Image (tube, rainbow, N blue to C red):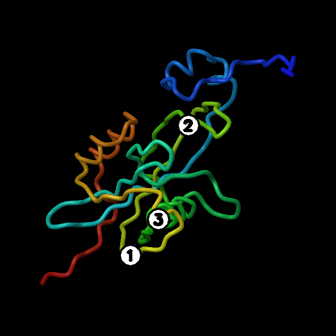
Amino acid sequence: MKSTKRRDKPRPDRSQTLLKQLAAVPGSLFAGAFRQQYGALCFRYQGNGVEILVITSREAGRWVIPKGWPMKGKKPFEAAATEAWEEAGVSGTVKKKPVGRYTYLKELDNGDVVPCIVDVFQIEVTEVTGGFKEQGQRMLEWVSTDEAARRVREIELKSLLVEFEPRGRKKRSRS
């Protein structure tokens, strides 16, 4: 027996492009405030330059940086560091102030699409380990800032990556 309950809004079809989904339910995009997330711009010094860690998303396999929702009892930079550890198995020196922010549209598990603001914190990676929480669910690659920018989809994140200059560079010993 079919339910006679009427839906207030149509449910987007997951096979449609994100823009088509938004066109079908424009009210859902602007009905509430942006959701906050925290991201980790993980980098290391390699030769004379900087390499950025990019990872794939679990669902779509898109190239992204580690990011996630606020965590109770953790400051924003601590949440970003936790995401880097859980999603990529990296840790290091985290700056307490964001190096930038970007916006994107997140598809939730229920099919809704919500706008998100991601405050991005730099982490100079000093430890890389296997056996992290999401190992096997993502691919990880160290690439140049330009290559990282080419791989990610979000325009503001592309700009942030291309323009990235590490803050508070450590003094490196001469060999």
Which circle's residue, 1 or 2, is located before the other in the chain?
Answer: 2
The x, y position of residue 171, in whole percent, is 25, 75
The x, y position of residue 66, in whole percent, is 46, 55
Q: Nearer the viewer, residue 12 or 32?
A: 12
The x, y position of residue 68, in whole percent, is 56, 52
> Where residue 135 is drawn, which disc sits there?
3
- Judged from the image, the secondary structure of the residue bearing numbered disc 1 is strand
Q: Nearer the viewer, residue 125 or 75?
A: 125
Taking the image as shown, residue 30 lies to the left or right of residue 82, namely: right
Which circle's residue, 1 or 3, is located before the other in the chain?
Answer: 1
Locate the C terminus by quadrant. Answer: bottom left
> Where residue 9 is drawn, which disc sits there?
none
**Is 127 placed above or below 69 here?**
below
Q: Residue at the bottom extreme?
A: 175
Kindly identify the amino acid type of the residue bearing the numbered disc 3.
Gln
- Judged from the image, the secondary structure of the residue bearing numbered disc 2 is strand
Kindly identify the amino acid type of the residue bearing the numbered disc 2.
Lys
**Is 175 placed above or below 168 here?**
below
The residue indicated by pointer 2 is 106
- Judged from the image, the secondary structure of the residue bearing numbered disc 3 is loop
